[in-house]
Image: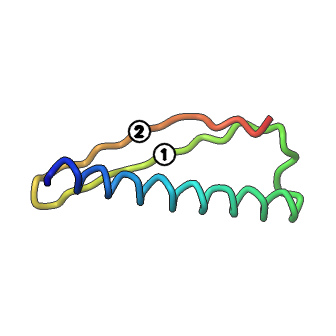
Amino acid sequence: MFNREIRKFLKQLGVTSQREIEAAVRKALDEGRLKGDERLTARARVTIDTLGLEHEIETEISLA
């Protein structure tokens, strides 16, 4: 049960995050703030207050 709940959370996180990133990139391209060949630094943080957990990852996303 616990493992399934973690996977459900991570799936929701991944799907919604991808949707938000894609929408933000489209908007920036439409507004001319991006050219389409950039590399964007992305950071994500997962926090579970009860456990005192703060896990952060950072990576680059290439638009080209």
Identified at 76% across, 40% down, the residue is: 63
What number is the disc on residue 57? 2
Whole-percent x, y for residue 53 in the image = 18, 49
In the displayed structure image, the side of residue 8 where residue 17 appears, left or right: right
Figure quadrant of the C terminus: top right
What is the three-letter code of the residue carrying label 1? Arg
Identified at 69% across, 63% down, the residue is: 23
Q: Is residue 20 above or below residue 53?
A: below
Figure quadrant of the N terminus: bottom left
**Residue located beneath label 1 in the image:** 43
Q: Is residue 19 above or below residue 60?
A: below
Which element is circle 1 on?
A: strand
Tell me the quarter of the picture where residue 36 sits.
Answer: top right
Whole-percent x, y for residue 15 in the image = 51, 57
Whole-percent x, y for residue 47 in the image = 26, 55
Q: Nearer the viewer, residue 60 or 8?
A: 8
The residues tagged by marks 2 and 1 sit, at their Cα atoms, a distance apart of: 6 Å
